[in-house]
């Protein structure tokens, strides 16, 4: 029996590209300065990741702990990592239908953004103490307050999904906490000639750290599996879809 699905897929891609070109052509007509057309940089299960998605992800990295350092902030390495994160996110999103995470409430979102404002350098010297100041910081990275809040809610939802999926069944044994305290934490204090805190006062923090390490390891293995099972294609610069 004739399978028309490849034709339908090809037709859908052509329609997507035609629609995108038409929309951006209309946008160009309204501008006085030239604007670079958007283009597809990767496909994940036939869903496109656009150059504009990559640029937004690079701006978003400014606000994410661990991604805003000098190594991540600039250069082709940053762009490659941004594309990898978008691919992983797309693969994970396709799995959420099997396990819907608990919704992030407005109060939780507000509290997390408030904590974020205390950590990021752009908010130093109380620049984000007012809504106007926070809006100005976001504008410098191409975001509106409402747009950023929705993106941050999506991030929180995905992190919650990952934690709910992998945290169940993980048990940190007392000997693991003791071993980390003796072999990792204590030597760090000794190196700076300081007295380490008693184990009882840091055991909960160590347990949480070890739990996060376990989850990170399981997540990495899962993403490798999803990439193997999924259909991921990264387009080379200048490459067009057939």
Image (tube, grey):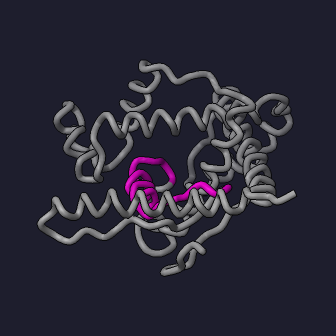
Image quadrant containing the N terminus? bottom right
Q: Nearer the viewer, residue 104 or 176?
A: 104
Q: Is residue 172 left or right of residue 105?
A: right
Q: Nearer the viewer, residue 230 or 22?
A: 22
Q: Is residue 137 above or below residue 235?
A: above
> Residue at point 69% right, 40% down?
212
Find residue 63 and report its horizontal and vertical position in percent: 40, 48
Q: Is residue 181 above or below residue 110?
A: below
Q: Is residue 166 above or below residue 18?
A: above
Image quadrant containing the C terminus? bottom right
Q: Residue furthest left?
A: 32
Which stretch did the figure color magenta?
A: 45-66
Q: Nearer the viewer, residue 114 or 102?
A: 102
Find residue 37 and report its horizontal and vertical position in percent: 34, 68
Find residue 183 and report its horizontal and vertical position in percent: 76, 50
Query: Quadrant of the rendered structure where residue 236 is?
Result: bottom right
Question: Can residue 198 be seen from the camera position used here?
Answer: no
> Residue at point 37% right, 64% down?
21
Query: Quadrant of the rendered structure where residue 145 is?
Result: top left
> Residue at point 42% right, 20% down?
106
Question: Can residue 62 be seen from the camera position used here?
Answer: yes
């Amino acid at each position: 029996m004739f399978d028309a699905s490849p034709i339908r897929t090809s037709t859908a891609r052509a329609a997507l590209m035609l629609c995108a070109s038409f929309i951006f052509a209309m946008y160009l007509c309204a501008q006085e300065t030239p604007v670079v057309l958007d283009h597809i940089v990767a496909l994940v299960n036939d869903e496109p990741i656009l150059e504009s998605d990559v640029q937004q992800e690079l701006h978003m990295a400014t606000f994410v702990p661990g991604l805003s350092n000098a190594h991540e902030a600039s250069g082709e390495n940053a762009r490659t990592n941004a594309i990898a994160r978008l691919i992983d996110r797309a693969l994970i999103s396709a799995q959420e239908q099997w396990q819907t995470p608990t919704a992030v409430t407005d109060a939780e979102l507000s509290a997390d953004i408030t904590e974020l404002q205390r950590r990021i350098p752009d908010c130093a010297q109380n620049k984000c103490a007012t809504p106007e100041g926070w809006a100005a910081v976001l504008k410098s990275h191409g975001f509106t307050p409402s747009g950023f809040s929705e993106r941050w809610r999506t991030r929180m939802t995905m992190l919650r999904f990952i934690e709910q999926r992998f945290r169940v069944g993980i048990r940190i044994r007392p000997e693991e906490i003791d071993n980390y305290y003796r072999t990792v934490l204590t030597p760090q204090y000794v190196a700076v000639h300081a007295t380490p805190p008693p184990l009882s006062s840091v055991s909960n923090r160590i347990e949480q750290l070890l739990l996060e390490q376990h989850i990170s390891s399981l997540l990495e293995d899962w993403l490798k599996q999803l990439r193997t099972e999924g259909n991921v294609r990264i387009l080379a610069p200048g490459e067009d879809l057939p």
